[in-house]
Image: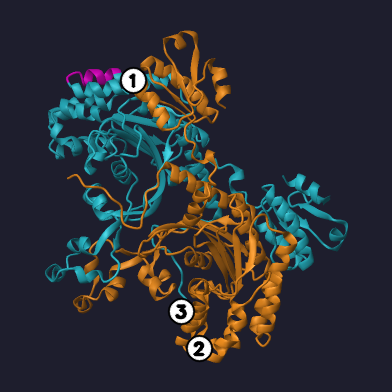
Chain colours: A cyan, B orange
Amino acid sequence: MAQKPSIPKGTRDFNPEQVAKRNYIFQTIQKQFETFGFQPIETPSFENSETLMGKYGEEGDRLIFKILNSGDYLNKVNEVLYAEKDSNKMTSEISEKALRYDLTVPFARYVVQHQNEIEFPFKRYQMQPVWRADRPQKGRFREFFQCDADVVGSSSLWQEVEFVQLYDSVFSALKLEGVTIKINNRKILSGIAEVIGASDKLIDFTVALDKLDKIGEEQVKTEMLSKGISKEGIEKLQPLFTLSGDFKSQIEQLKSILSTSEEGKKGIDELAFIDNAITELGLQSAKLQLDVTLARGLNYYTGAIYEVSAPEGVSMGSIGGGGRYDDLTGIFGLKDVSGVGISFGLDRIYLVLEELNLFPETVTKNIDVLFINFGEAEALFSLKAIKELRLKGVNAELYPDAAKMKKQMNHANKREIPFVVLVGDNEMNTGVYTLKNMISGEQFELPLKELIQKLT
Amino acid sequence: MAQKPSIPKGTRDFNPEQVAKRNYIFQTIQKQFETFGFQPIETPSFENSETLMGKYGEEGDRLIFKILNSGDYLNKVNEVLYAEKDSNKMTSEISEKALRYDLTVPFARYVVQHQNEIEFPFKRYQMQPVWRADRPQKGRFREFFQCDADVVGSSSLWQEVEFVQLYDSVFSALKLEGVTIKINNRKILSGIAEVIGASDKLIDFTVALDKLDKIGEEQVKTEMLSKGISKEGIEKLQPLFTLSGDFKSQIEQLKSILSTSEEGKKGIDELAFIDNAITELGLQSAKLQLDVTLARGLNYYTGAIYEVSAPEGVSMGSIGGGGRYDDLTGIFGLKDVSGVGISFGLDRIYLVLEELNLFPETVTKNIDVLFINFGEAEALFSLKAIKELRLKGVNAELYPDAAKMKKQMNHANKREIPFVVLVGDNEMNTGVYTLKNMISGEQFELPLKELIQKLT
C-alpha cells in the first residue's frame, strides 16, 4: 500500500530553516504590534458559510474553500434539487462551513459577537493562515498567513498616523530600510469621479486608475472610455497624470483639481493632517508617498488607503496594505463602528529579506552542542552534563546511538553544530569533558562547571 | 442583511487574555523542545485525502473533515454513481483534500517526501491545529492545537529516556509540579497476551485492560470474556491486577509473570533501562510510574507508551501522551525507520494551569502606558514621547480622541493600564510630562528623559 507522498498544489511544507525564518518575521511584527498597544485575538479556521459568503464579491465566493458536511450529507438533499445536478445549488445543501478567506471579515464577526466584552476603541492584531482556491502561481499560495492590525471604534485620524509609524517600525525592526508607504484616500477618488461626472462609475474608474503603473496612461484612458466615462471627463483627469513634487506640493495641486468637490477636499484635509504629523514625528527608515492612483480594488475602504512597496531595486508587488472602512461591522448588525487597519504580506516579506540577505544569522541556529555517544556508561555520564546545560538554556543533545565516531562527527558537521563534547574512559575517570570547537578545531578539557561556563 | 453572528460548534474565539495565556504555554514548550535539540517543521492544513484516509481506522476516516472540490465538482461524477445518492461513495468523487487530523501522519508523509534533504536521526517538533468532526463536549473541540516532538531514524532507548526528561522539563518550566509520567511498553502487553493465550486478540485485550481505572477489575474481566478470551487466561492475569510497590519492584513481579515470553522480557528490559537512567539522572518535579494497563488505544505503538496525568487533586484526563512506533513511514513506502514521540495537550494544560492559578501575572499584561488626549497639539507632543518609549520597548499608546478626561481614565482603568501620562498647556510649555501611577495614584512631573527612565 505504499503511496508516493505529495501535498496539494498551492500548499507548502516548511523545513526547520524556513520555520525559523518565518517565526523571526512573525515575532518582529508581533513585538511592534504590542509596542503600539495592539492585543492578539484568534478566530476559528472555519466559519459558518453564511458568515463568509457574499462578503468578497462573486469571485471571492468561488475561491472560498467549503467543508463537506459530515455523516450522510446527501440524505438531506431533496430529490428535485438533487436531480438538477447543479454544483452551485448543491454546495449550500451539503456544506455549512468554509475556511477563513481573510482575517477582516472574521474580525468584524468577532467584534459584533463579543461587543459587550470589548472595551472600545479596540486595537487587535491577528496572525493566522487563510485559504483561497486561487490558481497557484509564483508567490501565490492556497494557504498563506496574514498578519493584520486593526482599530475599531474610533474615527480619529491619529490612527492613520499611527499605522504609518507602525509600518515604519516593523520594517525598520526587520532592517528592511527604504520601503515606500504609499497613501491615498477614497474620498479623493470619489472627489475626482465627481469632478469628471463619473460618480456612478466610481468602481470602474478606480479599477482603471489603479492600473496606471502597469499599463500606462493611454490604456487607462482607453479602459475608462470603454466603461462609459466621457471624453471630457477623462480630459479633466490630465493634471492627475502629471502630478509631481513632494507630498505637500501634490496636495496643493489636488486642491485645485478638487476645488469643486466637498468630499474631495475632505480627503485632501485628511491626507494633509497625516503628512503634517509624520513630518513632525519623523520616520525611522521608510518614506511616505502620496499616490492618487492607489485604490486596492477593495470596495470597503472609505477613507485612507495604504500600500507598501519594497525598497527600490527589489522587484516585488506590495508587501503590505490596508485602509479605513467606516462600516465593516454593519454586515453583522452593528452600525457606526469605524475601523482602520493594515496587513503585512508575510510570504513576500520573506522573499525580500532572503533576496537582500537580511535574516540575522542567529535565526537559524539550532543546537549548540552535541555529545558524542561512546556507549552506555559514557552516554549516562554525558546526560548528566546535558541536563545541567539545558537548565542553563543551552541547546544540547546526545547522539542517540554508539555509532562510529566518524558518523557522529559527520552528523555534527551536516547540522552545523558548533561544538561537540567527547566523553570516554579517561573523561569519566577524571571527571572532565573534552570540548571541541568544530570550526576552529580547538579542544579543551573541562570539568562540568567550566564546560557550562564555556557554553553559556 | 444583518446576521446574528456565531461560530461553528466545537470551535472557539480566543480573546487577548486567552491568546496570551496560550502563547505562554506554546512558548514554554517550544523553548524546552529547542533546548532538547528538536527543530520545527510545519505542514499544510489540508492534505491530499489519500494521505490521511485509512490511517486512523474506520472511525477516524469518518471524523476527518473533507474539503469540497472547487468549480463544477458534480460535473465529473458519473451518472450511475450519482444516481445511487450514496454519501460514502460520493465523498471521494467530490472531495480530494482533507483537513489535518493529527500531526503524526503528516509528519510521516513529510519524512518520506523529504527523506533526501533530512539528516537522520531527525528530531522535529510541530505545533499546529488539527481538526476532528467529533461530537463537541467539555474539553473536546473540533479545532485544537497539538504540540508534538518526535525523533525518527534511531531505535536507541536513550530517546525514551530523553522524552521522560522532556516531559519533566516542560511541566517544571510551567511550574506545574507533581505530574505523573506513566510508562508502559507494547511488548509487555504482547507478552501478557501471549502468556494468557490471547495473542490473536491483542487489541481487544489491551482495549479492555486500558479501562481498568474507569470500570474496575470485574468489568474488565467480563469484557475480556465477552471478546473470547478464555477463563483460564483471565485467571493468569490476576497478579497484574495486584501489582504493587515502586517501579523496580513491579519490574520484578512482571519478570515472573512474563518468564515464558521472549517479547515480554524484552519489554521489561526496555522499561528497566529507562527507569535506571531516570533514577541516575533525577527528575525536577515529575514522577515516573510504571502502568501496565496503559495502552492508549493507538495501534501503531510498538515499544514505549507514555501518558502524563495532572497532579493529584486536579481532575483532568491525560495532559500528554506518546510512544514508539517502529514503522510509521512504511505506509508511505519508507521501511525500517523507527520513531518515538510525545504530544502535549494544550487545552487541558491550559485548564490545569488556570485551576491551579499558575499563569504568571506578567503573561496578560498588555499596554504599559496610555497618553491622555487633550487635543491636536497635545497629541502630537505626546506622540513624540510615545515614539521614543516604543523604541525602548515600552508598550505605549495615545488615546485616539480628545474625549472627556473621565472617559479616557475609565478606559485606562478597564484595560488595567498601570500608568497614564497627561500633557496639557503647562506640560507643553515647560517640556515635562505628568505621569500618573494608576494604582497608587502618585503623580510625577518628568522631562522626557526621566519619563523614559521611569517606564523602562
Question: Secondary structure of the magenta portion, mostly?
Answer: helix
The crowding category of the residue bearing disc 3, from other C-alpha atoms within 10 Å (few below 14, some 14 to 19, many at least 20), is few
User: What amino acid is labelled 2 in the image?
Assistant: Ile
| Residue at which label 3 appears | A1
Q: Give the tally of numbered discs.
A: 3
Q: Residue at x 33, y 21 (%)?
A: B403
The secondary element bearing badge 3 is classed as loop
On screen, residue B226 versus residue A193, left or right, reads right
Q: Give residue B76's position: percent from left, percent from top.
A: 24, 70
In the figure, B293 relative to B390: above or below? below
**Left or right side of B62 for B281:** right
Percent position of residue A350, x then y: 48, 45
Query: What residue is shown with label 2?
Result: B229
> Cα distance, mark 2 to mark 1?
78 Å
For mark 1, what is the residue?
Answer: B404
The three-letter code of the residue at mark 1 reads Lys
Q: Contact, CB < 8 Å: mark 2 with mark 1?
A: no
The chain letter under disc 1 is B
Q: Depth check: B430 or A360 in front? A: B430
Q: Residue at x 25, y 62 (%)?
A: A95
- Which residues fall within the magenta stretch? A252-260
Instruction: Assess whether residue A259 is covered by the magenta stretch.
Output: yes
Residue under mark 3: which chain is it in? Answer: A
Give the answer, above or below, for where A285 lies relative to B228.
Answer: above
Residue A243, quarter of the rendered image = top left
B11 or B443, which lies in front? Answer: B443
